[in-house]
Image (cartoon, rainbow, N blue to C red):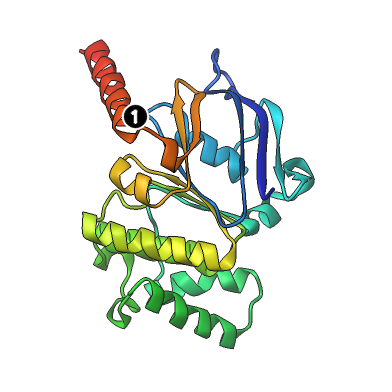
Amino acid sequence: MLLQLESIDYTPPNFTRPLLIDISFSLATGESIALTGITGAGKSTLLRLLNRLSEPTSGQILLNGDNYKNISPIALRQRVMLVSQEPKLLGMKVRESLAYPLQLQSIGIEEIKQRIVTITEQFEIPTAWFDRTELQLSAGQKQIVSIARGVITQPQVLLLDEPTANLDFTTAERVLNTLNNIARSQQMGTIVVNHQLELASRFSDRLLYLQDGKLLINEVSESVDWQNIQQQIRRSEDRSIAEWE
């Protein structure tokens, strides 16, 4: 198994209650998991644990059978890549931003050039963007570049936090389809936080549904009642809004 979580609990420092409770699931090579739930359910917190930006309070995470604790954070993040919800190009132009993570891995110039050609063709990133900074890109354009930058490193696991939030539906379909094709060809596992359940149902092999830090549903996509999940999320969000008013 590519990735395994075993009885993960997480309580941040100075917190009196846990944000994640007894989380267990696995991710196979080439598998795509959709992770959903209402705001505050623990989705982004879980991705941070998987990228080792936070450490679990109890339980263990395994990558190819190796305990996370035995892998240095830098080495782990080259194998488990996180694309955050708010894409940033670190003050670089698009071409530089795509090349930068490869340079950190000491990949040769010619291979970097070839990977940039390949990834920009796959995600239909025009050469006209290459010399633009993030100030010259729309939110959706930055999101596409950030996804491409995550994929170009060829990680074993790619974590994406709302990767299509700033994209129109047609573009989101195209990007997720491209991502799935690459993931399967490279045997890369993906975990995608996505509130757009119509997209999640079409571009995932399995659904994880979090609520109040607990994993309530872990099912293959074909057996999920997606309409019921949507209704649960809507009711939970309505209750949360009512409590704040």
In the rendered image, residue 33, in percent from the top left (x then y), is placed at: 49, 45
Establish if 124 lies above or below 86: below
Foreground of the two, 41 or 12 = 41
Please name the residue shown 59% across and 62% down the image: 187
In the rendered image, residue 131, in percent from the top left (x then y), is placed at: 33, 78
Establish if 152 lies above or below 7: below
Establish if 177 lies above or below 106: above
**Quadrant of image for the C terminus:** top left
Left or right: 136 in relation to 113: left
Give the residue type that dot 1 points to.
Ile
> Circle 1 — which element?
helix
Foreground of the two, 234 or 165 = 234
Residue matched to label 1:
229
**How would you rate the neighbour count of disc 1 (Cα within 10 Å): few for under 14, some for 14-19, many for 20 or more?**
some
Left or right: 157 in relation to 44: right
Please name the residue shown 29% across and 48% down the image: 165
Foreground of the two, 64 or 113 = 64
Would you say residue 53 is visible in this rendering? no
Please name the residue shown 36% across and 45% down the image: 201
Foreground of the two, 139 or 64 = 64
Left or right: 137 in relation to 153: left
